[in-house]
Image: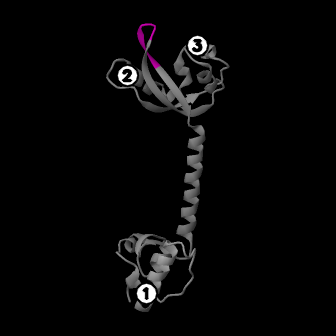
Amino acid sequence: YADDNYAQFFGHKSGDGVLDLDNLLYLIAPHQRNSAIQTYDAIMSGHNKPGINTYRNIDNEGNEFIVLTVDHVVDWQGEPAMQTTVVDLSNHVETLKKLQASERRYRELVDGSIQGILVHRNFKPLFCNQAYAQTLGFNDERELIAIDSIMPLFDPTFHESAHNDNHLLLSGQKSSIKKEAKCYRIDG
């Protein structure tokens, strides 16, 4: 049995179009068919419990798309059968790929910047780029990130102001603060 919604995932007008196929494995990308068979056999033999999987499927025009499957064992006319619910993940996967590409471009911009960039939480460094680390005399970013606080790098006359500015930013009282501060490289 295949309902019309299931069939339409694969470009068929109705469930009968799916049932006319010689083999349901034609709906799964060739490189994942063995995995699908093994999963089916393990579930139907009772070795594995039904669960959730992802597969690359193929529509009736040969286009691949990614689906989430939710499998259940049901009683079908007195015999156990596998019921599979399919959720198309193609849009989610495409959005994730675009997000990863955007993050990669952002990282390349930050890493390649000649401007020093630092992210900290209460003056404990969480992230910096190479330019920031080198400006302060560190060999690389990891070396700077390993320190407990950036405060010793600032002249003590700026400590109170830095704490006040940090509070104003974190409390939302200010959206940005631009200041000059005297800093010391790690070599003094």
- Main secondary structure along the magenta-highlighted residues: strand
Residue 23 drawn in magenta: no
Q: Which residues are the magenta region?
A: 76-82
Q: Where does label 2 land, which residue?
A: 43
- Point out residue 157 in the picture as x, y percentages from the top left corner: 43, 92
- Point out residue 80 in the picture as x, y percentages from the top left corner: 41, 13
Kindly state the secondary structure of the residue where label 2 is placed: helix
Amino acid found under the numbered disc labelled 2: Ile
User: Residue 73: which quarter of the image?
Assistant: top left
Which of pointers 2 and 1 lies earlier in the amino acid sequence?
Answer: 2
Q: Do the residues labelled 3 and 1 touch (CB within 8 Å)?
A: no
In the rendered image of this protein, does residue 103 appear above or below residue 127?
Answer: above
Amino acid found under the numbered disc labelled 3: Leu
- Callout 3 crowding tier (Cα within 10 Å): few <14, some 14–19, many ≥20: some
Front-lying residue, 37 or 88:
88
User: Residue 120: which quarter of the image?
Assistant: bottom left
In the rendered image of this protein, does residue 127 appear above or below residue 42?
Answer: below
Q: Closer to us: mark 3 or mark 1?
A: 1
Front-lying residue, 61 or 71:
71
The residue depicted at 55 percent of the width and 32 percent of the height is: 87
> Residues under labels 3 and 2: Cα distance?
22 Å
Amino acid found under the numbered disc labelled 1: Glu
> Residues under labels 2 and 1: Cα distance?
65 Å
Front-lying residue, 169 or 146:
169
Kindly state the secondary structure of the residue where label 1 is placed: helix
User: Residue 21: which quarter of the image?
Assistant: top right
Residue 174 visible in the displayed image: yes
Which of pointers 3 and 2 lies earlier in the amino acid sequence?
Answer: 3
In the rendered image of this protein, does residue 159 appear above or below residue 36?
Answer: below
Q: Are marks 3 and 2 in contact (CB under 8 Å)?
A: no
Q: Where does label 1 land, which residue?
A: 160
Kindly state the secondary structure of the residue where label 3 is placed: helix
